[in-house]
Amino acid sequence: MLDARKLLSDSDGTRKENRTKIIRAIMCRPGSQSELVRRTGLSPATISSAVQEMRADRIVKNTNRPIELEQTTGVALGISVGLHGVRVAGRLVHEPKDDIQLMTVSQGISGGNGWVAETAEAVHTMTQSIGRHRADIATLGMAVPWAVHARTLLPSDPVPTWADTRPVGRLLAEALALPPGDRIQVVIDTDARLAAFYEQTYNHAFETMLSVQVSAHVTGGLMLANTHVRGARGRAVSVGHLSVDLAGRECWCGLRGCLEGYVTAPALLEEAFVKCHARQVAPPGTIEEFITRARDRDLVCLDVLRRAAVQLGRGLVSATVAADQHAIVLGGTVAPGFELVLDECRREMDRSGWAREVPVLIGELDAATHGALLLGLAGHLN
Protein backbone atom coordinates (compact mmCIF):
# COMPACT_ATOMS: atom_id res chain seq x y z
CA MET A 1 0.00 0.00 0.00
CA LEU A 2 1.26 3.48 -0.89
CA ASP A 3 2.38 5.96 1.76
CA ALA A 4 0.55 9.27 1.27
CA ARG A 5 3.07 11.31 3.22
CA LYS A 6 5.93 10.04 1.09
CA LEU A 7 3.99 10.70 -2.11
CA LEU A 8 3.31 14.30 -1.08
CA SER A 9 6.83 15.06 0.14
CA ASP A 10 8.70 13.59 -2.83
CA SER A 11 9.09 16.80 -4.89
CA ASP A 12 12.84 17.17 -5.39
CA GLY A 13 13.24 18.58 -8.92
CA THR A 14 10.75 19.88 -11.48
CA ARG A 15 9.73 16.45 -12.73
CA LYS A 16 8.88 15.12 -9.27
CA GLU A 17 7.30 18.44 -8.33
CA ASN A 18 4.94 18.15 -11.30
CA ARG A 19 4.11 14.57 -10.36
CA THR A 20 3.31 15.61 -6.81
CA LYS A 21 1.06 18.35 -8.15
CA ILE A 22 -0.82 15.79 -10.25
CA ILE A 23 -1.13 13.40 -7.29
CA ARG A 24 -2.59 16.20 -5.17
CA ALA A 25 -5.13 16.97 -7.91
CA ILE A 26 -6.15 13.30 -8.12
CA MET A 27 -6.51 13.15 -4.34
CA CYS A 28 -8.86 16.12 -4.53
CA ARG A 29 -10.89 14.52 -7.31
CA PRO A 30 -10.07 11.74 -9.78
CA GLY A 31 -10.45 12.86 -13.38
CA SER A 32 -9.44 12.42 -17.00
CA GLN A 33 -6.11 13.66 -18.33
CA SER A 34 -7.83 16.67 -19.89
CA GLU A 35 -9.40 17.54 -16.53
CA LEU A 36 -6.02 17.26 -14.83
CA VAL A 37 -4.56 19.63 -17.44
CA ARG A 38 -7.24 22.18 -16.58
CA ARG A 39 -6.92 21.78 -12.83
CA THR A 40 -3.11 21.74 -12.58
CA GLY A 41 -2.15 24.14 -15.37
CA LEU A 42 0.40 21.61 -16.66
CA SER A 43 0.71 20.77 -20.36
CA PRO A 44 -1.06 17.72 -21.88
CA ALA A 45 2.34 16.18 -22.66
CA THR A 46 3.49 16.57 -19.05
CA ILE A 47 0.28 15.04 -17.72
CA SER A 48 0.41 12.13 -20.19
CA SER A 49 4.04 11.32 -19.41
CA ALA A 50 3.51 11.53 -15.65
CA VAL A 51 0.41 9.34 -15.75
CA GLN A 52 2.27 6.66 -17.73
CA GLU A 53 5.10 6.70 -15.17
CA MET A 54 2.68 6.51 -12.25
CA ARG A 55 0.88 3.56 -13.82
CA ALA A 56 4.20 1.77 -14.21
CA ASP A 57 5.03 2.58 -10.57
CA ARG A 58 1.56 1.38 -9.47
CA ILE A 59 0.68 4.77 -8.02
CA VAL A 60 -2.47 5.16 -10.12
CA LYS A 61 -4.81 2.45 -11.33
CA ASN A 62 -4.28 1.06 -14.81
CA THR A 63 -7.58 2.34 -16.20
CA ASN A 64 -8.35 5.01 -18.78
CA ARG A 65 -10.96 7.17 -17.01
CA PRO A 66 -11.03 8.51 -14.44
CA ILE A 67 -7.43 8.44 -13.23
CA GLU A 68 -7.52 7.18 -9.63
CA LEU A 69 -4.91 6.45 -6.99
CA GLU A 70 -4.19 2.96 -5.79
CA GLN A 71 -5.00 2.30 -2.12
CA THR A 72 -2.97 4.65 0.02
CA THR A 73 -2.32 5.08 3.73
CA GLY A 74 -2.98 8.58 4.92
CA VAL A 75 -5.97 10.55 6.19
CA ALA A 76 -7.12 13.87 4.73
CA LEU A 77 -8.93 16.17 7.17
CA GLY A 78 -10.85 19.42 6.85
CA ILE A 79 -12.01 21.69 9.67
CA SER A 80 -14.50 24.56 9.46
CA VAL A 81 -14.41 26.86 12.48
CA GLY A 82 -17.49 28.85 13.47
CA LEU A 83 -18.50 31.07 16.34
CA HIS A 84 -20.75 28.44 17.91
CA GLY A 85 -19.30 25.17 16.66
CA VAL A 86 -16.72 23.39 14.53
CA ARG A 87 -17.25 20.85 11.74
CA VAL A 88 -14.66 18.16 10.97
CA ALA A 89 -14.50 16.13 7.74
CA GLY A 90 -12.20 13.20 7.01
CA ARG A 91 -11.47 10.43 4.52
CA LEU A 92 -8.55 8.37 3.26
CA VAL A 93 -6.70 10.31 0.58
CA HIS A 94 -7.56 7.84 -2.20
CA GLU A 95 -11.25 7.58 -1.35
CA PRO A 96 -14.03 9.46 -3.20
CA LYS A 97 -15.96 12.39 -1.77
CA ASP A 98 -18.93 10.17 -0.97
CA ASP A 99 -16.84 8.35 1.66
CA ILE A 100 -16.22 11.50 3.70
CA GLN A 101 -17.21 11.31 7.37
CA LEU A 102 -18.43 14.40 9.24
CA MET A 103 -18.43 15.34 12.93
CA THR A 104 -19.60 18.35 14.93
CA VAL A 105 -17.78 20.00 17.84
CA SER A 106 -20.25 21.91 20.00
CA GLN A 107 -17.73 24.52 21.15
CA GLY A 108 -16.78 27.29 18.73
CA ILE A 109 -14.71 30.46 18.93
CA SER A 110 -17.26 32.27 21.10
CA GLY A 111 -16.79 29.63 23.81
CA GLY A 112 -13.19 30.65 24.49
CA ASN A 113 -9.78 29.18 23.72
CA GLY A 114 -10.86 25.64 24.53
CA TRP A 115 -12.18 25.07 21.01
CA VAL A 116 -8.69 24.07 19.82
CA ALA A 117 -8.41 21.21 22.33
CA GLU A 118 -11.99 20.11 21.60
CA THR A 119 -11.27 20.11 17.86
CA ALA A 120 -8.05 18.12 18.34
CA GLU A 121 -10.01 15.49 20.28
CA ALA A 122 -12.58 15.34 17.46
CA VAL A 123 -9.74 14.85 14.96
CA HIS A 124 -8.46 11.91 17.00
CA THR A 125 -11.95 10.40 17.08
CA MET A 126 -12.45 10.97 13.37
CA THR A 127 -9.11 9.37 12.48
CA GLN A 128 -9.92 6.31 14.60
CA SER A 129 -13.38 5.97 13.02
CA ILE A 130 -11.70 5.88 9.61
CA GLY A 131 -9.59 3.04 10.94
CA ARG A 132 -6.30 4.90 11.26
CA HIS A 133 -4.05 6.50 13.88
CA ARG A 134 -3.34 10.21 14.26
CA ALA A 135 0.17 9.55 12.94
CA ASP A 136 -1.52 8.67 9.62
CA ILE A 137 -2.80 12.22 9.14
CA ALA A 138 -1.40 13.31 5.79
CA THR A 139 -3.09 16.67 5.23
CA LEU A 140 -5.15 19.08 7.30
CA GLY A 141 -6.92 22.22 6.08
CA MET A 142 -8.88 24.74 8.12
CA ALA A 143 -11.61 27.23 7.15
CA VAL A 144 -12.10 30.29 9.36
CA PRO A 145 -14.69 33.13 9.22
CA TRP A 146 -12.21 35.97 8.76
CA ALA A 147 -9.67 37.18 6.21
CA VAL A 148 -6.39 35.24 6.43
CA HIS A 149 -3.03 36.77 5.53
CA ALA A 150 -1.39 34.27 3.16
CA ARG A 151 2.10 34.68 4.66
CA THR A 152 1.34 34.68 8.38
CA LEU A 153 -1.95 32.71 8.36
CA LEU A 154 -3.15 35.21 10.98
CA PRO A 155 -6.25 37.43 10.72
CA SER A 156 -5.79 40.45 8.46
CA ASP A 157 -6.66 44.00 9.51
CA PRO A 158 -9.23 45.14 10.33
CA VAL A 159 -9.28 42.21 12.73
CA PRO A 160 -12.82 41.19 13.73
CA THR A 161 -13.60 41.31 17.42
CA TRP A 162 -14.53 37.61 17.40
CA ALA A 163 -11.43 36.37 15.53
CA ASP A 164 -8.97 34.11 17.31
CA THR A 165 -5.73 36.05 16.84
CA ARG A 166 -3.52 33.21 18.02
CA PRO A 167 -1.59 31.06 15.49
CA VAL A 168 -4.44 28.54 15.51
CA GLY A 169 -2.88 26.26 12.90
CA ARG A 170 0.26 25.76 14.98
CA LEU A 171 -1.76 25.38 18.18
CA LEU A 172 -3.95 22.71 16.61
CA ALA A 173 -0.90 20.83 15.31
CA GLU A 174 0.56 20.89 18.83
CA ALA A 175 -2.75 19.83 20.39
CA LEU A 176 -2.86 16.79 18.11
CA ALA A 177 0.20 15.51 20.03
CA LEU A 178 1.77 13.82 17.05
CA PRO A 179 4.96 11.81 17.68
CA PRO A 180 8.08 13.95 18.33
CA GLY A 181 9.48 15.32 15.09
CA ASP A 182 6.35 14.31 13.17
CA ARG A 183 4.77 17.71 12.60
CA ILE A 184 1.70 18.09 10.40
CA GLN A 185 1.26 21.46 8.72
CA VAL A 186 -2.20 23.01 9.02
CA VAL A 187 -3.11 25.22 6.05
CA ILE A 188 -5.75 27.91 6.61
CA ASP A 189 -7.97 30.15 4.51
CA THR A 190 -11.25 32.05 4.62
CA ASP A 191 -14.37 29.86 4.74
CA ALA A 192 -16.02 31.46 1.70
CA ARG A 193 -12.92 30.97 -0.44
CA LEU A 194 -12.77 27.29 0.49
CA ALA A 195 -16.50 26.89 -0.13
CA ALA A 196 -15.91 28.29 -3.62
CA PHE A 197 -13.03 25.83 -4.10
CA TYR A 198 -15.27 22.90 -3.20
CA GLU A 199 -18.27 24.05 -5.23
CA GLN A 200 -16.12 24.63 -8.30
CA THR A 201 -14.36 21.27 -7.91
CA TYR A 202 -17.48 19.15 -7.47
CA ASN A 203 -20.71 20.96 -8.26
CA HIS A 204 -20.44 23.96 -10.59
CA ALA A 205 -17.69 24.08 -13.22
CA PHE A 206 -17.78 27.84 -13.78
CA GLU A 207 -14.47 29.42 -14.71
CA THR A 208 -14.98 32.20 -12.17
CA MET A 209 -17.15 31.73 -9.12
CA LEU A 210 -17.98 33.95 -6.16
CA SER A 211 -18.93 32.24 -2.91
CA VAL A 212 -20.75 34.26 -0.26
CA GLN A 213 -21.06 32.67 3.18
CA VAL A 214 -23.79 34.17 5.36
CA SER A 215 -23.89 32.96 8.95
CA ALA A 216 -23.03 35.01 12.03
CA HIS A 217 -20.97 37.13 9.63
CA VAL A 218 -20.54 37.51 5.86
CA THR A 219 -17.41 36.44 4.00
CA GLY A 220 -16.65 36.27 0.30
CA GLY A 221 -14.32 34.12 -1.77
CA LEU A 222 -13.49 34.18 -5.48
CA MET A 223 -12.12 31.38 -7.64
CA LEU A 224 -10.57 32.49 -10.95
CA ALA A 225 -10.08 29.39 -13.11
CA ASN A 226 -8.42 27.16 -10.47
CA THR A 227 -6.77 30.00 -8.59
CA HIS A 228 -7.78 31.28 -5.17
CA VAL A 229 -8.00 35.07 -5.45
CA ARG A 230 -6.67 36.33 -2.12
CA GLY A 231 -5.36 39.83 -2.62
CA ALA A 232 -2.31 41.35 -0.96
CA ARG A 233 -3.55 40.69 2.59
CA GLY A 234 -6.12 37.94 2.08
CA ARG A 235 -9.03 40.39 2.05
CA ALA A 236 -10.03 40.16 -1.63
CA VAL A 237 -13.79 40.23 -2.26
CA SER A 238 -14.83 41.04 1.31
CA VAL A 239 -18.50 41.04 0.35
CA GLY A 240 -19.72 41.59 3.90
CA HIS A 241 -18.19 45.06 3.93
CA LEU A 242 -19.63 46.40 0.71
CA SER A 243 -21.92 49.29 1.62
CA VAL A 244 -25.62 48.89 0.87
CA ASP A 245 -26.64 52.05 2.76
CA LEU A 246 -24.20 54.95 3.02
CA ALA A 247 -26.27 56.44 5.84
CA GLY A 248 -26.70 53.09 7.55
CA ARG A 249 -25.56 51.72 10.86
CA GLU A 250 -21.87 51.76 11.75
CA CYS A 251 -20.05 48.45 11.31
CA TRP A 252 -17.33 47.05 13.57
CA CYS A 253 -14.90 47.55 10.65
CA GLY A 254 -15.31 51.35 10.79
CA LEU A 255 -17.48 51.71 7.68
CA ARG A 256 -21.18 52.46 7.50
CA GLY A 257 -24.00 50.47 5.99
CA CYS A 258 -22.02 47.25 5.46
CA LEU A 259 -24.02 44.33 4.06
CA GLU A 260 -23.05 42.27 7.11
CA GLY A 261 -25.21 44.48 9.32
CA TYR A 262 -28.41 43.54 7.47
CA VAL A 263 -28.31 39.87 6.41
CA THR A 264 -26.53 37.80 9.09
CA ALA A 265 -28.20 35.49 11.57
CA PRO A 266 -27.87 37.99 14.47
CA ALA A 267 -29.28 40.82 12.30
CA LEU A 268 -32.29 38.76 11.21
CA LEU A 269 -33.01 37.51 14.73
CA GLU A 270 -32.75 41.03 16.14
CA GLU A 271 -35.23 42.44 13.63
CA ALA A 272 -37.56 39.48 14.14
CA PHE A 273 -37.40 40.02 17.91
CA VAL A 274 -38.49 43.66 17.57
CA LYS A 275 -41.35 42.84 15.20
CA CYS A 276 -42.54 39.87 17.27
CA HIS A 277 -42.45 41.97 20.44
CA ALA A 278 -44.65 44.58 18.75
CA ARG A 279 -47.13 41.83 17.84
CA GLN A 280 -46.84 40.23 21.28
CA VAL A 281 -45.76 36.87 19.89
CA ALA A 282 -42.76 34.75 20.86
CA PRO A 283 -39.68 35.51 18.72
CA PRO A 284 -37.51 32.78 17.17
CA GLY A 285 -34.55 31.91 19.37
CA THR A 286 -32.21 30.49 16.72
CA ILE A 287 -31.61 31.01 13.02
CA GLU A 288 -32.81 27.44 12.41
CA GLU A 289 -36.13 28.20 14.14
CA PHE A 290 -36.36 31.48 12.24
CA ILE A 291 -35.96 29.70 8.88
CA THR A 292 -38.43 26.97 9.87
CA ARG A 293 -41.04 29.58 10.75
CA ALA A 294 -40.40 31.41 7.48
CA ARG A 295 -40.82 28.12 5.61
CA ASP A 296 -44.14 27.67 7.45
CA ARG A 297 -45.23 31.11 6.13
CA ASP A 298 -44.74 33.05 9.38
CA LEU A 299 -45.46 36.63 8.28
CA VAL A 300 -42.87 38.28 10.54
CA CYS A 301 -40.01 35.98 9.57
CA LEU A 302 -40.90 36.12 5.87
CA ASP A 303 -41.03 39.92 5.95
CA VAL A 304 -37.64 40.12 7.67
CA LEU A 305 -36.15 37.70 5.14
CA ARG A 306 -37.57 39.58 2.15
CA ARG A 307 -36.14 42.88 3.36
CA ALA A 308 -32.75 41.25 3.93
CA ALA A 309 -32.88 39.63 0.47
CA VAL A 310 -33.18 43.07 -1.13
CA GLN A 311 -30.08 44.25 0.73
CA LEU A 312 -28.29 41.04 -0.23
CA GLY A 313 -29.14 41.70 -3.88
CA ARG A 314 -27.62 45.18 -3.63
CA GLY A 315 -24.45 43.79 -2.13
CA LEU A 316 -24.17 41.11 -4.80
CA VAL A 317 -24.52 43.73 -7.54
CA SER A 318 -21.60 45.68 -6.06
CA ALA A 319 -19.55 42.48 -5.78
CA THR A 320 -20.31 41.63 -9.41
CA VAL A 321 -19.20 45.07 -10.59
CA ALA A 322 -15.80 44.39 -8.98
CA ALA A 323 -15.36 40.66 -9.66
CA ASP A 324 -17.34 40.03 -12.89
CA GLN A 325 -17.78 36.36 -11.94
CA HIS A 326 -19.77 33.80 -13.93
CA ALA A 327 -21.91 32.73 -10.97
CA ILE A 328 -22.57 33.32 -7.28
CA VAL A 329 -23.04 30.52 -4.75
CA LEU A 330 -24.66 31.33 -1.40
CA GLY A 331 -23.70 29.27 1.62
CA GLY A 332 -23.71 29.40 5.39
CA THR A 333 -26.44 28.86 7.96
CA VAL A 334 -28.66 31.65 6.57
CA ALA A 335 -28.56 30.43 2.95
CA PRO A 336 -31.53 28.02 3.36
CA GLY A 337 -33.58 31.03 4.44
CA PHE A 338 -32.56 33.13 1.46
CA GLU A 339 -33.50 30.22 -0.79
CA LEU A 340 -37.12 30.87 0.26
CA VAL A 341 -37.00 34.49 -0.93
CA LEU A 342 -34.42 34.28 -3.69
CA ASP A 343 -36.84 36.00 -6.09
CA GLU A 344 -36.53 39.19 -4.01
CA CYS A 345 -32.74 39.08 -4.28
CA ARG A 346 -32.96 38.26 -7.98
CA ARG A 347 -35.35 41.14 -8.63
CA GLU A 348 -32.95 43.61 -7.03
CA MET A 349 -30.03 42.26 -9.05
CA ASP A 350 -32.03 42.38 -12.30
CA ARG A 351 -32.38 46.13 -11.90
CA SER A 352 -28.69 46.40 -12.78
CA GLY A 353 -27.19 45.52 -16.13
CA TRP A 354 -24.02 44.52 -14.27
CA ALA A 355 -25.64 41.50 -12.59
CA ARG A 356 -28.67 40.62 -14.71
CA GLU A 357 -27.06 37.55 -16.31
CA VAL A 358 -25.30 36.23 -13.20
CA PRO A 359 -27.02 33.16 -11.68
CA VAL A 360 -27.33 32.89 -7.90
CA LEU A 361 -27.16 29.31 -6.62
CA ILE A 362 -27.56 27.77 -3.17
CA GLY A 363 -24.51 25.79 -2.12
CA GLU A 364 -24.05 22.84 0.18
CA LEU A 365 -24.24 23.57 3.89
CA ASP A 366 -20.86 21.91 4.58
CA ALA A 367 -19.10 23.33 1.51
CA ALA A 368 -16.50 25.19 3.60
CA THR A 369 -15.65 22.03 5.57
CA HIS A 370 -15.23 20.01 2.38
CA GLY A 371 -13.22 22.88 0.90
CA ALA A 372 -10.90 22.86 3.90
CA LEU A 373 -10.21 19.18 3.28
CA LEU A 374 -9.44 19.97 -0.37
CA LEU A 375 -7.14 22.82 0.66
CA GLY A 376 -5.07 20.43 2.75
CA LEU A 377 -4.81 18.01 -0.16
CA ALA A 378 -4.02 20.71 -2.70
CA GLY A 379 -1.43 22.32 -0.43
CA HIS A 380 -2.03 25.80 -1.82
CA LEU A 381 -0.40 27.58 1.12
CA ASN A 382 2.55 25.24 1.63
Image (cartoon, helix red, strand yellow):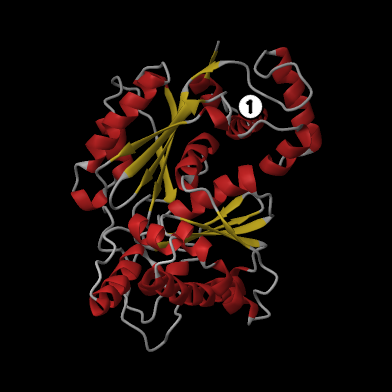
Where is residue 308 shown, x and y percent of the image? 44, 73
Q: Quadrant of residue 172?
A: top left
**Residue at 76% across / 19% down in the picture?**
63
Question: Is 108 left or right of 374, judged from the image as shown?
Answer: left
Question: Does the image show residue 176?
Answer: yes
Q: Quadrant of residue 182?
A: top left
Where 264 sits versus 179, above or below? below
Q: Quadrant of residue 305?
A: bottom left
Task: Check disc 1 and report the residue beneath it.
Answer: 16
The quadrant the N terminus occupies is: top right
As drawn, the residue found furthest toward the top would be 1
As drawn, the residue found furthest toward the bottom would be 247
Considering depth in this image, is 366 or 57 the residue closer to the camera?
366
Where is residue 292 shown, x and y percent of the image? 40, 57
Where is residue 256 shown, x and y percent of the image? 36, 82
**Residue at 34% across / 53% down in the picture?**
154
Where 92 sits versus 191, above or below? above
Question: Is 177 left or right of 142, judged from the image as shown?
Answer: left
